[in-house]
Image (tube, helix red, strand yellow):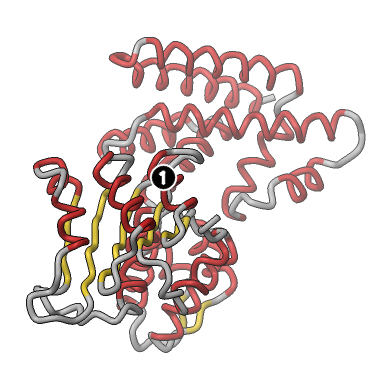
């Protein structure tokens, strides 16, 4: 089958096999898909500045003229030379699937077809056509894992002549991922901000690359854990102003109490102390947030945590059933849990 595993894609792009004339690049990370398609286009024997031999299309062009993609693939260059047909935003449109099958069955000698697509399920028509075709190749692009994120940090900061402290690196890595182009944009913005400083610090990361939505949600959840009603109100106000759904805070709060439930189980059975449980189970939580988590683990007991989990599950279900008042349902649920946290803290 003509496809590469996610970790093999970069090697293929650096040395593409010329026998493959239809190249499908797909996945949930649209930025990475675009970046790899651009890198691949530079490896084919086509002058990218030649508008006669480089044809760029999107799905709207195919929708208006279903035969155009295959026509472009089979066309002969006006002045000779190799041609590149580059389609963006593809899904499982029949003209696209037909073009991949046609190229695979009867590969053109002078034309390369590059297709950028979103996340395609296994067995979907376009992905299947590329994976099973003799002259087609499917290249998956999934979100950056921790190793790739750190490699990206090193690549961009070294190019800018910058070093980075360990705490700043950890915070920066937490704020990146999900979209390769967005991550590069954040890193280049950070490098510009730190130009001439020689080193990136934690304060620099907070000032420039903080994910506003993630930071606001974390602030709200931590306020719930500490029973800080004023802090929760401030965080929710910022979230609303940023057009972020409060429902996301409700979900994050649920995940946090699920973790607390696990920790309380270890504490109440005598297997771990509170600090040990937080240290071991909270490895992925930023160190600045751990004090709020430790306070919650100390103050809440297992039964109370399970009551809150039931309450949060109910609120999530109700918010989904009534999306028109979902923000109000979420806010009330969060305030109720914060009040309980405040009462526990006073004991």
Which residue lies at the image location 59% right of the left edge and 32% below the top edge? 255
Position of residue 104 in the picture relative to residue 263 (left or right) = left
Packing grade of label 1 (10 A; few <14, some 14-19, many >=20) is: some
The residue closer to the viewer here, 47 or 183, is: 47
Q: Position of residue 25 (x, y in %)?
A: 39, 58
Q: Name the residue under label 1.
A: 119
> Which quadrant of the rendered structure holds the C terminus?
top right
Q: Where is residue 6 in the image (x, y as percent from the top left)?
A: 54, 59
Q: Where is residue 182 in the image (x, y as percent from the top left)?
A: 34, 60
The residue closer to the viewer here, 304 or 172, is: 172
The reply to whether residue 176 is visible in this rendering is no
Position of residue 38 in the picture relative to residue 264 (left or right) = left
Picture quadrant where residue 287 is located: bottom right
Number of labelled discs?
1
Position of residue 6 in the picture relative to residue 175 (left or right) = right
The reply to whether residue 110 is visible in this rendering is yes
Question: For the view shown, which residue lies furthest in the right direction?
Answer: 270
* 169 is higher (above) or lower (below) than 319: below
Which residue lies at the image location 19% right of the left edge and 53% below the top edge? 69
> Which quadrant of the rendered structure holds the N terminus?
bottom right
Which type of secondary structure does the marked residue at label 1 adopt? loop
* 234 is higher (above) or lower (below) than 140: above
* 142 is higher (above) or lower (below) than 50: above
The residue closer to the viewer here, 59 or 70, is: 70
Which residue lies at the image location 75% right of the left edge and 23% below the top edge? 301
Which residue lies at the image location 39% right of the left edge and 10% below the top edge? 321
The residue closer to the viewer here, 127 or 297, is: 127
């Amino acid at each position: 089958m003509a496809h590469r595993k996610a970790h093999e894609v970069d090697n293929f792009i650096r040395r593409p096999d010329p026998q493959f004339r239809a190249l499908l690049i797909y996945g949930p990370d649209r930025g990475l898909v675009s970046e790899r398609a651009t890198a691949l286009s530079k490896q084919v024997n086509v002058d990218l500045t030649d508008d006669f031999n480089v044809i760029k299309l999107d799905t709207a062009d195919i929708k208006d003229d279903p035969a155009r993609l295959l026509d472009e693939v089979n066309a002969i260059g006006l002045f000779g030379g190799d041609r590149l047909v580059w389609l963006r935003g593809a899904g499982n449109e029949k003209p696209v699937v037909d073009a991949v099958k046609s190229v695979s069955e009867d590969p053109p000698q002078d034309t390369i077809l590059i297709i950028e697509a979103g996340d395609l399920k296994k067995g979907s028509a376009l992905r299947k056509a590329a994976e099973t075709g003799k002259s087609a190749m499917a290249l998956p692009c999934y979100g950056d894992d921790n190793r790739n994120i750190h490699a990206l940090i090193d690549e961009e900061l070294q190019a800018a002549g910058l070093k980075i402290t360990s705490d700043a690196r950890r915070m920066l890595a937490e704020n990146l991922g999900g979209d390769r182009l967005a991550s590069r944009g954040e890193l280049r913005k950070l490098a510009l901000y730190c130009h001439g400083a020689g080193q990136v610090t934690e304060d620099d990361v907070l000032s420039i690359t903080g994910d506003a939505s993630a930071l606001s949600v974390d602030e709200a959840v931590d306020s719930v854990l500490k029973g800080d009603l004023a802090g929760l109100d401030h965080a929710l106000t910022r979230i609303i102003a940023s057009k972020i759904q409060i429902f996301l805070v409700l979900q994050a709060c649920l995940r946090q109490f699920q973790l607390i439930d696990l920790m309380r189980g270890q504490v109440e059975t005598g297997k771990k102390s509170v600090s040990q449980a937080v240290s071991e189970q909270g490895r992925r939580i930023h160190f600045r947030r751990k004090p709020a988590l430790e306070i919650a683990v100390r103050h809440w007991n297992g039964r109370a945590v399970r009551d809150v989990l039931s309450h949060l599950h109910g609120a999530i279900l109700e918010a989904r059933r009534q999306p028109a008042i979902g923000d109000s349902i979420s806010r009330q649920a969060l305030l109720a849990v914060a009040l309980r946290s405040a009462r526990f803290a006073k004991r």
